[in-house]
Image (cartoon, rainbow, N blue to C red):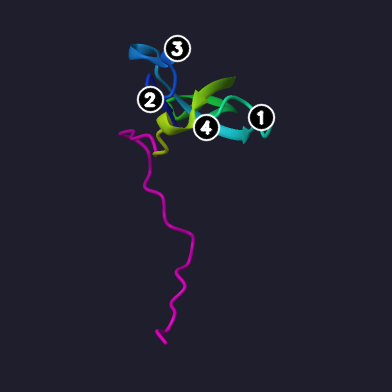
């Protein structure tokens, strides 16, 4: 997940980070905000750097796969369910 200035001003500009989310806190917070726990990612190596807890706006979170030059393509393990129309 990319967390940048759209999710919280503390991650604006060059302070944006990629976070591999491991949990979402279910405790109540301000409306539209959430606590996320995960690991910041080094895109160049594809490795986790440090465990982080971040407070961010849900509307500003960007769920996407980081693009790295040496990352192998992932195969889609989920099978498709085909249904007949009625």
| Sequence-first disc among 4 and 1 | 4
Question: Residue 72: x percent and y percent?
Answer: 38, 43
The CA span between labels 2 and 4 is 15 Å
Instruction: Say which quadrant the N terminus sits in.
Output: top left
Q: Nearer the viewer, residue 86 or 77?
A: 86
Q: CA distance from mark 4 to mark 1?
A: 22 Å
Q: Name the residue rendered at 44%, 80% in the picture.
A: 83
The residue drawn where x is 43% and y is 33% is 59
Q: Measuring from the top left, give residue 14's x and y in whole percent.
A: 34, 12
| Mark 4, residue position | 20
Q: CA distance from mark 1 to mark 2?
A: 35 Å
Q: Is residue 73 magenta?
A: yes
Residues at marks 3 and 2, CA–CA distance in whole angstroms = 23 Å
Residue named by callout 1: 28
Q: Nearer the viewer, mark 3 or mark 1?
A: 1
Q: Which marked residue is nearer to the observer: mark 4 or mark 1?
A: 1
Q: Looking at the image, can residue 13 be seen?
A: yes
The residue where tag 2 is placed is 44
State the predominant SS element of the stretch in magenta: loop
- Tags 4 and 1 in contact by the CB under 8 Å rule? no
Counting other residues with Cα less than 10 Å from the Cα at mark 3, is it few (<14), some (14-19), or many (20 or more)? some
Q: Which residue is mark 3?
A: 10
């Amino acid at each position: 997940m990319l967390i940048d200035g759209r999710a919280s001003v503390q991650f604006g500009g060059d302070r944006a980070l990629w976070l591999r989310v491991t949990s979402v806190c279910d405790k109540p917070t301000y409306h539209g905000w959430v606590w996320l726990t995960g690991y910041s990612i080094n895109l160049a190596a594809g490795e986790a750097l440090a465990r982080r807890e971040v407070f961010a706006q849900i509307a500003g979170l960007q769920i996407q796969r980081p693009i790295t030059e040496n990352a192998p393509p992932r195969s889609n393990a989920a099978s498709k369910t085909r249904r007949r129309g009625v």
